[in-house]
Image (cartoon, helix red, strand yellow):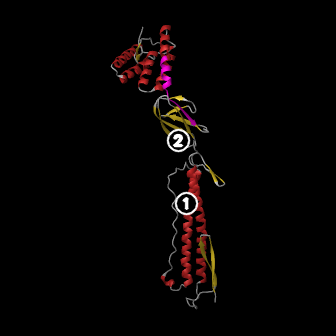
Amino acid sequence: MLRRGLVGLALVALWPGVVLGQARDSAGAEKLYDDGAKLLAKDDWVGACAKFADSFKLDPAPGTQLNLASCSEHEGKLALAWSRLKDARSLNADTKSETQRKQIESFIQASIARLEPRLPYLTVRIANAPAGAVALRDQQPMVIGVDLPIDPGKHVIVVGAPGYIEQTRELTLAEAQREVVEFTLLPQPKAGPGEGPIPDTGVKPKPEEPRPIDSPPASEQSSLSGIQIGGLILGGVGVATLGASIGLGVVALSKRDELDALNCVEMGDSLSCPPGVTAEAKDLSDSGSTLALVSTVTTFVGAAAAGAGVLMLILGGSDNAESADTAKPGVGFLPYGDQTGAGLMMFGVFQ
């Protein structure tokens, strides 16, 4: 019995749909096919293609599959249409009539030859692909490193591997376009024991603010000598300078952490970095070195000032029998600095 011929693309033919090896609802499949043909005659592609799909589920015949290939081509899904033509060829192998089988094969060959020059192709490559690397195209797995046919239009590519940062890229392909997309996976930042990956929130640690020295009670201020008052002031400046140096050191360490996160290696005066991050790494390295140098200098100056302040307090003390304005003999030191360097200046009180 003749049933379910190819409908669409200005070609109407009747072929038997014969596939062995499974239970079918031939009558239901033929009724759905006829309904689809009537809708297609009214140029209702959406309704017709839905009927052809339901018919194919009840009885997967080569003629129905060829009509589904025509539906895919009409929707612009060239790769899907090409794939359905290949499936129709496999189904046609079980067509009993040799004449009908040759007619179907001839049509399939002509359709494939017409579609293949229009097919876009996409290749996804991963440089030095780690173990377990996978690639998804539109949330579907795809083979890495193979030129594969793809439907024209917009696509989303996602690649990843255990222990590596996932990467996503969007692209749009036109008919007959061949595109190669290359990825380089970067390792995830290492976390401490028992911790998960540390996300980069972009928030930098806030430098600790120096704590001011409490002023002496009013009852004691009248008994302080001039040198002791100077020692309090100088000591306060020294502690504040030390606090600032700590803050600068923290910021310098954060720059170093950011540089390590980029997987760069310092080789003498140069940096070896992955592609695309060299400029950022150079800026981080330069700013981190400058902050570290300033932190070192301010630490030295702050420590010297604090030490000199303590010494001035000791040397400026007075006995109860002596005048408050009379200083004890001794030697002290004051920090100094200019564009050429920093150091200590010695001073003395003698009788």
In the picture, residue 49 is in which quadrant? Answer: top left
Task: Judge whether residue 338 is colored magenta.
Answer: no
Of the numbered discs 2 and 1, the one sitting upstream in the chain is: 2
Where's residue 111, x and y in %? 47, 19
Task: Judge whether residue 116 is colored magenta.
Answer: yes
Where's residue 113, x and y in %? 50, 20
Front one among 128 and 165: 128
Identify the residue position indicated by label 1 in the image.
Answer: 251
Q: Secondary structure at mark 2?
A: strand
Where's residue 212, x and y in %? 51, 72
Q: Residue, x 52% and y 41% (percent of image)?
A: 167
Identify the residue position indicated by label 2 in the image.
Answer: 167
In the picture, residue 58 is in which quadrant? Answer: top left
- Residue 19 shows up from this direction: no
* Left or right, residue 340 beside residue 91: right
Q: Amino acid at mark 2?
A: Gln
Q: Residues within 10 Å of mark 1 (few under 14, many from 20)?
A: many
Q: Residues within 10 Å of mark 2 (few under 14, many from 20)?
A: some
Marks 2 and 1 sit apart, C-alpha to C-alpha, by 29 Å
Q: Secondary structure at mark 1?
A: helix
Q: Residue, x 51% and y 61% (percent of image)?
A: 206
Q: Which residues are magenta?
A: 110-125
Q: Amino acid at mark 1?
A: Val
